[in-house]
Amino acid sequence: MNSKSITSVSYILIGNMLTIYSSIGDGLTAKLTAVLGLILFFIGLIQFKDYLDVKGASGVNKLIWAAILGIIANLLTFIPLVGIIPAGICNIIAFFLQLIGLINLKSSEKIGKAGAGGVNLLLVALTLMVLASIFNIVPFVGGTIKTVIAFIAFILIPFGWVKIQGAIADHLLEPEMIIETKRKVEYRDWFYENRIVIVSIEAILIIFCIVYFLIFKHSL
């Protein structure tokens, strides 16, 4: 359970970043990548929920439903004309679920003050995505402004989830969580050995997304 709670945040982080593709990029590639991101986001949240207290689990449940609605909304956009309105409704509901879910998660004792700071970054990123959507309807310069704002949100997301991930690791190493010294050492070793792999994967993903943004934004 302990190792799963840490790695689940990596799934959430990667999935959350990929969902921003639909705002940064254009076309079929961006939409399919966003769907993949939402699926990873959903899987990570399912695992993460079991680790949290009642308050945090309640927040994650709302994030799970937001992810489901996000998947539905992205799939609806493949339906010409007819799918636009229901997709928009799903996205609006998903936004409020994310907002309430993150506020509930921030109150969870399991992530502490450090994790709450990470949630604050995610709330800022969520707010920026709303601004990006608003600017998207502005003629001429709106699309460019939207892309820039979405990219800033994209950068904030890993910082937010990494802070939550670190807070979880610190909590798992507290004396009341791990009584036996041998077990404490095993958990610490596991985290720091795998943390190198986790951070490497996250860094590769960020670099890949930046390259996508700069080079392939107008493809497909």
Image (cartoon, rainbow, N blue to C red):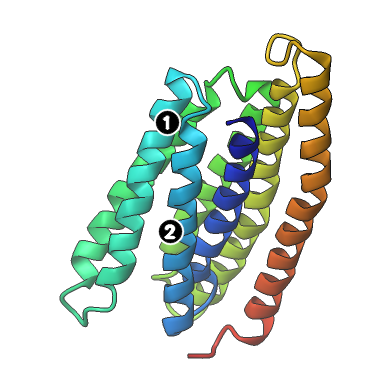
Which residue: 83% across, 40% down?
192
State the residue at coordinates (74%, 10%). Answer: 179
Viewed as shown, does residue 119 lie left or right of 214?
left
Label 1 crowd (10 A; few <14 / some 14-19 / many >=20)? many
Q: Quadrant of residue 77?
A: bottom left
Spot occupied by residue 93 in the image (x, y as percentages of width and height): 28, 47
Q: Residue at x 58, y 83 (%)?
A: 217
The residue indicated by pointer 2 is 39
SS at mark 2? helix
Q: Position of residue 173 (x, y in %)?
A: 76, 21
Residue on which disc 1 sits:
59
Percent across and percent down for residue 71 are 34, 61
Residue drawn at point x = 58 percent, y = 17 percent: 109
**From the viewer's perspective, is 62 left or right of 132?**
left
Whichever of labels 2 and 1 marks the residue nearer the N terminus, that label is 2
From the viewer's side, name the closer residue of 60 and 2: 2
